[in-house]
Image: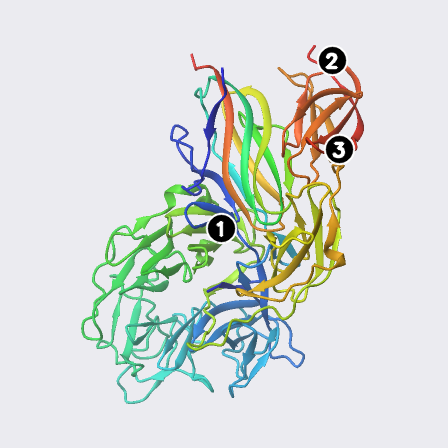
Amino acid sequence: MPLYVGESDGGRVIKLGTGLTQITTDATESVLPVWETWDFLPTTESGDTVFRNIIVTVSYSNGYLIRVTPYMDGTALTAQDFSGSGAGTMDCQAFVAARGARLKVKVEALARTGELEMVNIRVGYKPLRLAP
Amino acid sequence: MALSYFSFGPFTKGVSDTRNTSLDASGLLRVGRHLYFDGVGKLRAANGSTVSLTLMDDAGTPAEVTSICEIVQWADTVLAVAHSTVTDKAYLYRLDSSLTGYYNLAGAFTAASQALPLATALWTSMPDAPVVTIAEMNGEAHIACTNASTASTQSFPTRVFTGSAISDLTADIDGSAGAETIYALGVFSFQSHRWMWGFGSGATAATGYRPDLLRFGGPIGGGFAASGSGSFSVGHRVKSLRESVVGVCVAGEVAYIGTSYSLWPVVGFGFDTWDKSNPLDESFGFIGPKAACAANGVCYYWSPRGPMRVAGLSRPEPLWDMIPATVASVVDPEKIVASFDPTTDQVVWFFRGNGVTGNQLVCAFDIRRGVFLGPDRDIGVVVGAANTINPITAPNAAAATGPSGAPTTPVTSAVGTTHATASWTNGDATAATTVEYRVQGGTTYTTAGTTAVGATTFVITGLVGGVPYEWRAYHLKNGVASSYVGPVAGSQFTTGTTLTAPSGLSVTDTGPSFRDNAFLQWTNSPETGTSTELYVDSVYQGVVGTGVSSAYLTLADGTYNFSIRHIRSGYTASAYNGPVSQTITQLS
């Protein structure tokens, strides 16, 4: 029972929910999912925490290529890419090793070669100081 | 002290684009794009889209129309209405239920990727694309558009398609014993009766301009009654634009009549009992004629305040609290198009947002889990109409269509110690491919995995070094498998004992920081179970574990050569990736 859409700026009837690329105005593009968490504040807004690492667990049917970007107190840290082949589940461990009050994580798929499932995102941390 | 761990997921609460930061963040995403839920809390990447058909105009050399206005199921086929600003005509198309071709007025089917309209145009001299509704009744389709009439003109009559002819809809709606041409602004079917709303600017009270008026015909497609006995108006202000009917959505036992500020439910058990009753409290009305859809007896609609849902005669429930930023970003909300996607359990509203010129953003609400997913994902095209189309499957249908051929020409490449790349030529590009492998001469195959549709390569992983393997593959489509290709010489290989090296090493000087200042990133080879050794000026610095593809090092000021290699117990270490030279600055 697929969903079909008709273009408002053209004459194409398009079937949604099929393949790894989607139709655009003039070509196709990969369907690249994005996951972004809310901020995690273990020691409240003005406390201090060392965030050590982020573990992104993905399941995939035919390889994966993802980018993990930590945001410390709203500022993006260095993005780290992870890739794998075949089918399976992988814990991708991105290092943060930075100190601040709050951390959020953005995960982007950079390419699609098969099914991709976001299993979980975890962060390892050590609280240093609660807010005064 | 050991590290503490916080789990953001598993993500079961969907997406919210605003929240009190003191609330628990676990299970809730701030942004999610191209996602859907599957099974019990499995958050998957959504699939894409493909072109099924292109609708063409009726010019001597047919050209693509400029806008699609409606697409609905009708009988065992599909009806679509499209408009061309080149010909200033609106056309009707009859397509098969799998959208593989089109019918002509005589009922002859042509399989084609470009569909031609039925011979007679719906409306001519129409410069702007109309907003169209289609209602099925008694084997006929009634087709109306919102620019049919105004207070001073009546331009585009309601049309009737019988399956073999297109004509104007006529009925004696003023009791004059003579039929008048109908200029309805919209049509729908409800409880085996045909309904229409809004009327043209005829000379009598019955045919005068009444955008607030609903008129229903007799049961099973019977004729429309004269004014008064087969009609009622919504609202309290006759001929008021504010109380004009904006759109209608039939969900369960109720027809929800949406004006610009309220919903008027119509319930009853037929002609004699229908009553417009009172408007639903805090319903806020429909924002546009296509802003509502029904799913499982519930009406989901976009009101002037944002998305809502209502069932039966209960109080409508706001859904906008989770996505106020998305609601505030909507441009031209009256052009929102709603539809239900049963394959993902999502009601989707196609809208135009900040910086986007057309309805190509999607606000998706998972109705089974009651959560939003992807309130602003971009689907790449501007949407004018949307609908679920069920392909026709006969009760005693023949076996499902399998692959049209098997894969051929197997080739094995990039053989490492624990991996190899299998590739082939597709025998059916619309099928997926499953790859199996075994030790040469063995009796049991292991399934390596199944590719996406159309893929021609698969990386087999989890192998053991120094062992001869062979693989075979088959296409899979609609649950039907093709014959195998392999094992043949091209699908046989022996894994090595020297690990494949990592690649793409880059080193960044992260500058003064509280701890680390050299950041290394690389791409792991497909080898499984490998760790990665880090070297600086050929001096061993440490090792990072399986799957890790980045690391920090703390170094004194200076310029260094960095290199890495894969290792694994029982295997020969890979070659080095590097050296990569980088100047490092330490905390001063």
Amino acid on which the number 1 mark rests in the picture: Val
User: Is disc 2 surrounded by few (<14), some (14 to 19) or many (20+) residues within 10 Å?
Assistant: few
* B154 to the left or right of B377: left
User: Circle 2 marks a residue in which chain?
Assistant: B
Q: Residue B59, labelled with which disc? A: none
The answer to whether B386 is drawn above or below residue B108 in the figure is above
The quarter of the picture where residue B472 lies is bottom right
Point out residue B421 in the picture as x, y percentages from the top left corner: 71, 50
The quarter of the picture where residue B155 lies is bottom left
Q: Residue B556, labelled with which disc? A: 2
Front residue of this view, candidates B137 and B413: B413
Q: Are marks 3 and 2 on the same chain?
A: yes
Residue topped by disc 3: B572
Between disc 3 and disc 2, the foreground one is: 3
Mark 3 or mark 1: whose residue is earlier in sequence: 1
Amino acid on which the number 2 mark rests in the picture: Ala
Coloration mode: rainbow
**Where, quadrant-wise, is the C terminus of chain B in this rendering?**
top right
Q: Are marks 2 and 1 on the same chain?
A: yes
Residue topped by disc 1: B331
Amino acid on which the number 3 mark rests in the picture: Thr
Front residue of this view, candidates B439 and B455: B439
Q: Are marks 3 and 2 in contact (CB under 8 Å)?
A: no
Distance between mark 3 and mark 1 Cα atoms: 61 Å
User: Circle 3 marks a residue in which chain?
Assistant: B
* Residue depicted at x 56% and y 74%: B100
Distance between mark 3 and mark 2 Cα atoms: 32 Å
Outermost left residue? B273
Distance between mark 2 and mark 1 Cα atoms: 55 Å
